[in-house]
Image: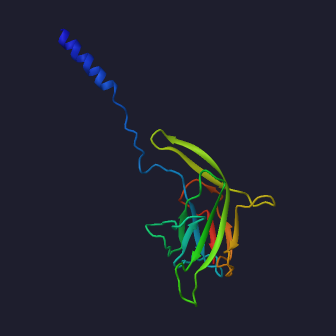
Amino acid sequence: MKKILLLLFVLSFSFSSCEKDDICDANTVTTPRLVITFYDYNNSSIEKNVSNLSIFGDGMEEAVTFSGSTLINGSTVSIPLKVNAETTKFHFILNYGSTNVIVPANEDIITFNYTTKNIYVSRACGYKTNFTLNPDTSDTKPFEHTDAATPDQKWIQYIAVENSNIDNENETHLAIYH
């Protein structure tokens, strides 16, 4: 009888130390990126691909990677915003690396202004951050669009906020017309 009690006692202690695995499921929604869709400036209903676009965060030496590449050739891109700040500046360089005089590289700078909200996801995943672009009022702007330090005419003709709440990556947040 003592052996059975001792065995039960040892087993109870061994099971009491088991914990649930703290693994964040890959399908769990985490901090969303800003989704940008490019459109034709002359026909605003048509998406327009960009050619050899690289997007650099201010002060970064490497471009944002999207779908495994730092050169974007398409009509949609997603870029990360800083979770510990209320502004993020990006350098959008069209025809990046071009040595062609006829189609030279062209840099525009966009600074995004926003508020953040941290949301608890789970013990395994921690927190995610949602963003809200600032409203377009006389005091605040959702973004500032400027030309490069060496002016070369802006390649971005117009920018429109499609959805100021950045809480998922399933919709366009910003439309850029070029």
Tell me the quadrant of the picture where the N terminus can be found: top left
- Left or right of 151? Residue 77 is left
Number of numbered markers: 0
x 68%, y 68%: residue: 160
60 to the left or right of 20: right
| Residue at the extreme right | 138
Position of the C terminus by quadrant? bottom right
Could you tell me residue 102's position as x and y percent?
58, 91
User: Residue 104 versus residue 73: which sits nearer the camera?
Assistant: 104
Residue under the point 50% across and 73% down: 72
Residue 32 horizontal/vertical position (percent): 54, 55
Q: Is residue 164 left or right of residue 70?
A: right
- Dividing the picture into quadrants, the one containing residue 162 is bottom right
The percent coordinates of residue 106 (x first, y second) are: 61, 79
- The residue at the point 57 percent across, 78 percent down is 94
Q: In this picture, is 26 found above or below 46?
A: above
Residue 161 position, x and y percent, is 67, 64
Q: Is residue 129 above or below residue 135?
A: above
- Taking depth in this image into account, of 129 and 169 the one nearest to the observer is 129
